[in-house]
C-alpha cells in the first residue's frame, strides 16, 4: 500500500489474520485487554484516529458521534448489523460508515439450524441431564421431541441469511414459507411460499425463524398479539436481534406451553439475559454465536478493512451504509 499510513482505532481484539492485516496497513490503536468500552472510553480510545473499526458491542450513539474528534472520517463495523451506530448522526457529521455484510451469512444460518434442531429435539434438556450425571438410561418416553420433515419453517426476513437457512432446512425436508418486505424472484425463492403479512406466516408455521434486522417495523414483532396468531406449540428461533422479541410475552407463552420451545442466540440488552429464560426447560440458549466461525469472523474483518482501504485510497466503499 503506497498511501501515507493512517491511524486506525480498533475497539476490540480481532481474529489473528484480521489483526495482522490491520497492523500491516495501519498505525493501529488496539484495545489489548479487550474490555468493552463505554461511551467515554470509546471517544478516548478512538481519539484523533483517521478511522475506527468497531464491533456490535460499541454503542456509537449520537453522544459518541458528536464527541469524536474532527480527524475521524470513517467508521467501519465488524458486523452486518448497524443498529449500534447512529447513522443519522454520522451522516450529519460527514463520517462515512461501512459494514461487513457477507461474512456472517452461512455461519448464522448454521446457528439458526442448530437452534431449530436443538429446540425440536430438546437438546438442552438432554445435555443438562448428561452434565448433571442424572441419566438413568433409555426409555420409550424420555425427552421425546419432534421431527422436522414436512414441518413448515416460517422465515421472517428473507435476506441472505434467511435464504441460506432455507437452503439448509430444505435438506431436512422442511417446507419453506417466508415473509419479507419484497417478494423474491422465483430463482431466489426456490419454491418458498411468500406471505405478505407476518400474521399469515404465523398461521401456517411450525417453526418461526427471525432473520430480519432490528428496525421500527420489526422491534418486538414477537409479542402477545402475534403469538396468538401462531400455532400452539410453535418453535421460535432468533438469530437476528434480541429486541425483535417482547421478552415478557415470550416468557409467559413458553411458561404456559403456548409457545413450545424457543431457541435464542440474541437477547435484548445483551450480555444481560432475562434470567427467566434460564429457568425454563423449553429454551435452548446460545451466547450470540451466530457469526462465531473462523471463516465468518475472518471475512467480516476483511470486509470491514476493505471499506477502510477503499476510503483512504479515495475509492467508493464496497459496503457502504452511510
Ligand atoms: C452481526 O454481524 O451483526 C452479528 O450480529 C455478529 O454476530
Image (cartoon, helix red, strand yellow):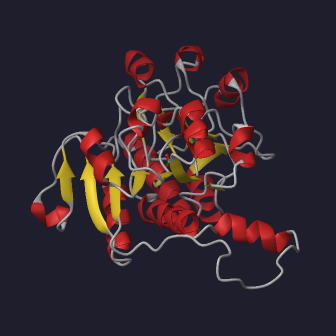
Residue 89 x %, y %: 44, 17
- Please state which of residues 205 and 165 is positioned toward the viewer in this rendering: 205
Q: Is residue 153 left or right of residue 147?
A: left
Q: Residue furthest bottom?
A: 138
Residue 38 x %, y %: 71, 27
Q: Residue furthest front?
A: 140
Residue 53 in sight from this viewpoint: no
Residue 201 x %, y %: 28, 48
Could you tell me which residue is drawn at 44 percent across and 50 percent down? 232
Residue 161 x %, y %: 37, 57
Residue 194, compared with residue 170, is above or below; it is: above
Residue 191, compared with residue 49, is above or below; it is: below
Q: Quadrant of the C terminus?
A: top left
Residue 223, compared with residue 133, is above or below; it is: above
Could you tell me which residue is drawn at 83 percent across and 71 percent down? 131
Q: Is residue 58 left or right of residue 302?
A: right
Q: Residue furthest left?
A: 186
Q: Is residue 187 left or right of residue 150?
A: left
Could you tell me which residue is drawn at 86 percent across and 73 percent down? 134
Amino acid at each position: 500500500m503506497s498511501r501515507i499510513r493512517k491511524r486506525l482505532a480498533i475497539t476490540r481484539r480481532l481474529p489473528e489474520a484480521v489483526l495482522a492485516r490491520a497492523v500491516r496497513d495501519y498505525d493501529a490503536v488496539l484495545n489489548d485487554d479487550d474490555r468493552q468500552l463505554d461511551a467515554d472510553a470509546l471517544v478516548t480510545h478512538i481519539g484523533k484516529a483517521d478511522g475506527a473499526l468497531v464491533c456490535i458491542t460499541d454503542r456509537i450513539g449520537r453522544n459518541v458521534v458528536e464527541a469524536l474528534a474532527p480527524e475521524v472520517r470513517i467508521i467501519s463495523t465488524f458486523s452486518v448489523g448497524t443498529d449500534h451506530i447512529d447513522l443519522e448522526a454520522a451522516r450529519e457529521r460527514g463520517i462515512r460508515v461501512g459494514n461487513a455484510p457477507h461474512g456472517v451469512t452461512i455461519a448464522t444460518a448454521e446457528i439458526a439450524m442448530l437452534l431449530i434442531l436443538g429446540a425440536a429435539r430438546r437438546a438442552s434438556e438432554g445435555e443438562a441431564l448428561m452434565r448433571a450425571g442424572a441419566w438413568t438410561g433409555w426409555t420409550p418416553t424420555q425427552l421425546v421431541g419432534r421431527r422436522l420433515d414436512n414441518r413448515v419453517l416460517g422465515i421472517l426476513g428473507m435476506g441472505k441469511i434467511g435464504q441460506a437457512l432455507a437452503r439448509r432446512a430444505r435438506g431436512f425436508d422442511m417446507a419453506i414459507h417466508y415473509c419479507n418486505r419484497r417478494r423474491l424472484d422465483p430463482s431466489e425463492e426456490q419454491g418458498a411460499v411468500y406471505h405478505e403479512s407476518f400474521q399469515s406466516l404465523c398461521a401456517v408455521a411450525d417453526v418461526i425463524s427471525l432473520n430480519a434486522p432490528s428496525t421500527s417495523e420489526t422491534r418486538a414483532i414477537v409479542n402477545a398479539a402475534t403469538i396468538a396468531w401462531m400455532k400452539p406449540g410453535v418453535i421460535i428461533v432468533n438469530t437476528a436481534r434480541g429486541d425483535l422479541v417482547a421478552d415478557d410475552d415470550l416468557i409467559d407463552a413458553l411458561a404456559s406451553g403456548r409457545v413450545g420451545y424457543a431457541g435464542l442466540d440474541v437477547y435484548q440488552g445483551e450480555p444481560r439475559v432475562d434470567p427467566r429464560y434460564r429457568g425454563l426447560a423449553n429454551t435452548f440458549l446460545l451466547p450470540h454465536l451466530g457469526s462465531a466461525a473462523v471463516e465468518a469472523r475472518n471475512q467480516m474483518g476483511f470486509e470491514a478493512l476493505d471499506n477502510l482501504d477503499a476510503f483512504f485510497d479515495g475509492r467508493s466503499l464496497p459496503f457502504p451504509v452511510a
